[in-house]
Image (tube, grey):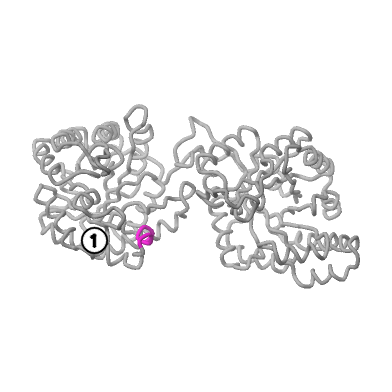
């Protein structure tokens, strides 16, 4: 048999149809991992392959679409990843019997990359690499990456396959029809052109849509892609029939579109969800008379990874960013949002701080899962009254991805562009324990999403609009005294990698612990680091913070010093002295570019007592 790439250069090659919907049609429940059938019911898997071969398929696709360790973990099968994938290739190879090519199938992880999902790109790459390595051991004829809606995740899969194999690689995007026009989304062709610029041998469109939508994509893309194209539409759109999802397209309908797809430039044609051996047989007969369209002579250049607009330079996004990135030692003070409707005290406090040289205020977002005035509203009121800038804390607990994107675009439009990305405390910690937490993503995913907006891309990687982008200055929090320091260091590094541009730390009372944390994170790119300072109000306050507030650690020597201070007023003065001494010691560290001061019990005067001459009006 001639090589796969040589064949598609000369003629139209017929792929097989669906595996998943075929298992379902033959009585396998949808609540199990179909890929496990490679070891649990080999006869069933082999019989489906054999039926497609008899129908005329020239490429058999392995039953390994969802056999990556992340997806298999949901079924308790992660440790069998290698076994399931290798068995999948062997079964397809046995059924092919030398009469068809074997395509090793890899699909998405099922969990999605941040920010639309919770999975780090590195974790996706590792999962795909493990799967690809197992498939490679059994010697498939080619790799088929299919049903990828997110080109960022497809990029990780391409990288993973190329890390272990140089076999022919076909990379497919999935498209859903536009709900208004019924045709493909506007960016479908651009995504296909982008994928074609990678180290792949062919590209394709599969799943998500029926033959008509896929045909429109192929017709528009064929003259731009410059590489062979695979078209594998669904058998129309499924309908509910007596509680079952049924694909109603006829074999003749699928066959007629198979011919049109080939005439418009597809070098490989097959079927996805709902496509049966009977449909493949009919498609075979319709394709026999089709001559392949010629490939264009030139390949259009595209970016290697999903791209966007160049971000606005960090120092040009806000005044706070300018000050930090120009080397100024900045002072930020937390402003308490009111529990009720009257913001007057907080607004007056912001003006008082502005007059005393504080660089920026920061406003928490439902701290400790309590309901208070929203930070964006209070920040706008404070700016209107005194002109002071705010850092708006924005947490993932309360909003889904749609709400987050809407809020962040709105924040940019309102000029509230300093954003501290936080995961948020779960509702059970606060005054509404029965409230529903969302947590579509965590702070790392939120940082990733904000940086996409800064490049003119929405959370799904699509352009916001012609030449449109946000200019948000995004930071993150960290806890140098975390009990699991390895975890905290890892999350710090991942936040920097996601695009964090400054850090606020939890309150620090032991500079040696802070310096150890900074040493542990010294290998990552340096961004401005503001140390948290919270003056202790009393010995009782110190004991409460140490014993009852998660993430707070106050050394015994500090607590003992507070206990020995005498009365309440004396303890308050000692608390101020401890905070001032801590500030003096930590500011000597080259990584420390400012302080983030928590006013004890809302006393802004105590803040000035601590920072002193650091806060001087410009």
The kind of secondary structure the magenta stretch mainly shows is helix
Task: Give the quarter of the image for residue 353.
Answer: top right
Q: Position of residue 100 (x, y in %)?
A: 13, 53
Q: Position of residue 451 (x, y in %)?
A: 54, 44
Q: Which class describes the residues within 10 Å of circle 1: few (<14), some (14-19), or many (20+)?
A: many
Q: In the rendered image, which quarter is residue 412 located in?
A: top right
User: Is any atom of residue 231 visible in this view?
Assistant: no
Q: Which residues make up the magenta segment?
A: 69-75
Task: Give the residue at x 20% y 37%.
Answer: 248
Q: Residue at x 27, y 36 (%)?
A: 214
Left or right: 448, with 9 as reference point: right
Q: Which residue is mark 1?
A: 37
Check the picture and name the quadrant holding the N terminus: bottom left
Image quadrant holding the C terminus, namely: top right
Q: Across the whole image, how many numbered discs are drawn on residues?
A: 1
Circle 1 sits in a helix, a strand or a loop, which is it? helix
Residue 259, quarter of the rendered image? top left
């Amino acid at each position: 048999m001639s090589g796969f790439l040589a064949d598609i250069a000369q003629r139209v090659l017929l792929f097989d149809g669906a595996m998943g919907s075929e298992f379902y049609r033959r009585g396998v429940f949808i609540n199990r991992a179909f890929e496990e059938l490679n070891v649990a019911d080999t006869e069933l898997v082999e019989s489906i392959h054999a039926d497609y071969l008899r129908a005329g398929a020239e490429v058999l696709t392995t039953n390994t679409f969802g056999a990556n360790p992340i997806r298999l973990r949901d079924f308790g099968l992660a440790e069998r990843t290698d076994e399931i994938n290798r068995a999948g290739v062997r079964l397809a190879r046995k059924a092919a019997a030398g009469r068809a090519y074997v395509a090793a199938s890899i699909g998405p992880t099922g969990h999605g990359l941040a920010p639309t999902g919770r999975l780090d790109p590195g974790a996706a790459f590792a999962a795909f690499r493990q799967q690809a390595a197992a498939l490679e051991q059994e010697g498939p004829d080619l790799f088929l990456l299919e049903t990828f809606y997110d080109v960022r995740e497809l990029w990780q899969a391409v990288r993973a396959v190329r890390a272990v194999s140089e076999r022919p690689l076909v990379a497919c995007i999935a498209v859903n029809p536009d709900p208004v026009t019924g045709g493909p989304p506007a960016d479908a062709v651009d995504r296909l052109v982008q994928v074609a610029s990678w180290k792949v041998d062919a590209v394709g469109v599969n799943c998500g849509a029926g033959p008509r939508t896929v045909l429109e994509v192929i017709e528009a893309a064929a003259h731009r892609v410059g590489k062979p194209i695979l078209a594998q539409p669904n058998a129309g759109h499924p309908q509910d029939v007596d509680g079952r999802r049924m694909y109603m397209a006829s074999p003749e309908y699928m066959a007629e579109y198979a011919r049109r797809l080939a005439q418009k430039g597809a070098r490989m044609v097959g079927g996805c969800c709902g496509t049966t051996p009977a449909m493949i047989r009919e498609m075979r007969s319709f394709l026999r008379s089709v001559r392949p369209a010629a490939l264009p002579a030139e390949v259009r250049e595209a970016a290697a990874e999903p791209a966007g607009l160049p971000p606005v330079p960090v120092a040009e996004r806000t005044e706070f960013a300018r000050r930090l990135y120009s080397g100024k030692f900045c002072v930020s003070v937390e402003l308490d949002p009111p529990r009720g409707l009257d913001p007057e005290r907080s607004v007056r406090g912001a003006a008082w701080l502005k007059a005393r040289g504080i660089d920026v205020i920061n406003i928490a977002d439902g701290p400790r899962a309590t309901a208070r005035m929203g930070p964006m509203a209070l920040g706008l009121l404070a700016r209107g009254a005194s002109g002071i800038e705010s850092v708006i804390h924005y947490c993932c607990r309360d909003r889904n991805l749609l709400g987050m994107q809407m809020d962040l675009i709105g924040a940019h439009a309102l000029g509230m562009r300093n954003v501290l990305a936080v995961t948020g405390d779960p509702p059970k910690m606060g005054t509404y324990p029965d409230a529903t937490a969302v947590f579509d993503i965590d702070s790392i995913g939120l940082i990733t999403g904000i940086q996409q907006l800064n490049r003119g891309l929405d959370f799904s990687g699509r352009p916001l609009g012609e030449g449109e982008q946000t200019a948000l200055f995004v930071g993150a929090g960290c806890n140098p005294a975390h009990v699991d320091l390895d975890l905290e260091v890892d999350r710090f590094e991942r936040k920097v990698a996601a695009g964090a541009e400054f850090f606020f730390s939890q309150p620090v009372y032991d500079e040696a612990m802070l310096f150890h944390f900074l040493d542990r994170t010294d290998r990552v790119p340096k961004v401005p680091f503001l140390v948290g300072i919270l003056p202790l109000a009393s010995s009782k306050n110190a004991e409460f913070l140490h014993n009852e507030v998660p993430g707070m650690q106050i050394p015994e020597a500090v607590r003992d010093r507070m206990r020995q201070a005498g009365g309440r007023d004396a303890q308050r003065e000692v608390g101020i002295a401890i905070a001032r001494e801590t500030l003096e010691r930590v500011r000597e560290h080259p990584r420390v570019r400012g302080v983030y001061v928590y006013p004890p019990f809302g006393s802004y005067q105590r803040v000035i007592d601590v920072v002193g001459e650091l806060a001087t009006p410009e």
